[in-house]
Amino acid sequence: MYEYCGSLGGNKALGPQRRCKTLNQAHKGPGGRDDYTHISWSEIGNADVTDPDTFEDLRKILDITIADEKSKASFLGAWIRPRNSGMPVSFSDLCLKRFSEQTRQPQMPTRAQLKSNRTLYRDYLNWWHVQRRDFLTTCRDYLRDSARLGPEAVILFTETRPSRATCLKEAASSPTRPPVFPEKKPSCQTLFFPGIWAWPLSSESATPGEVGSGSTPSPVSTPELCPYSRPHTHHGVQ
């Protein structure tokens, strides 16, 4: 299981470069750091799924932990489970530029425009979800190469969110809503355990909690499946 937030350690590690940037650019982390959440200890790095360098970074990790070790164990694939803001939606200038170029915007939008224009904001999130889907699919295809795990390799992806104990208690009290990997979003708005996505398989739709169900998440996922897709609506998120 990879709590991936970019590689860590060394002068060239990707994670501490923190290429993902928040929408509000409030710099409320320790020392004015541009943190996504109030959980500063988990903000040690982040990885931008729209950045080509991110796949190359994760590829090296998959090589030394899976491909190089396949003679010693049997691997089904890789489970990627980033913490809070390990792989967040980025509003960096570079991300805005990629969005503008790939969706043929008349001009590169600003963060202020994203905050004030709900349609533009939604278009941006939809674009980002496609980028995340493509990133994970690329990781899957890399593992499926015959030199690594072969055609049956899978990528499991779990997105996590901050939660509060009262919400965990509420979720645990319901037999149909366990606190980990529920099939549906709990009624408590501050608890988000959307489940594990099985990457890939065939159809264009899936519901949270389906593992190996024969479904692939839609490229335009619901907002709660996007880490901090609506930063202003989440406790402690800027």
Image: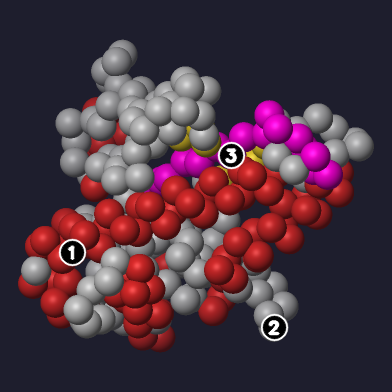
Q: Nearer the viewer, mark 1 or mark 2?
A: 1
Magenta extent: 146-162
Mark 1: few/some/many CA within 10 Å (<14, 14-19, 20+): some
Please name the amino acid that badge 2 sits on.
Asn
Characterize the local packing of mark 2: few (<14), some (14-19) or many (20 or more) Cα atoms within 10 angstroms: few
Residue 110 falls in image quadrant? bottom left
Residue highlighted by disc 3: 155
Q: Residue at x 30, y 22 (%)?
A: 177
User: Badge 2 is on which residue?
Assistant: 11
First reached walking from the N terminus: tag 1 or tag 2: 2
* Residue 9 visible at all: yes
Assess whether mark 2 and mark 1 are in contact (beta carbons under 8 angstroms). Answer: no
The residue lying furthest to the top in this view is 175
Instruction: Quadrant for the N terminus, please.
Output: top right
User: Residue 10 in the image: x percent, y percent?
Assistant: 72, 78
Instruction: Identify which residue, 196 or 171, lies in the foreground.
Output: 196
Element type where label 1 sits in the image? helix
* Marks 1/2: CA–CA distance: 35 Å
Observer-nearest of 9 and 129? 129
Real-space Cα separation, disc 2 to disc 3, in angstroms: 29 Å
Q: Position of residue 71 (x, y in %)?
A: 91, 37
Q: Position of residue 141 (x, y in %)?
A: 64, 44
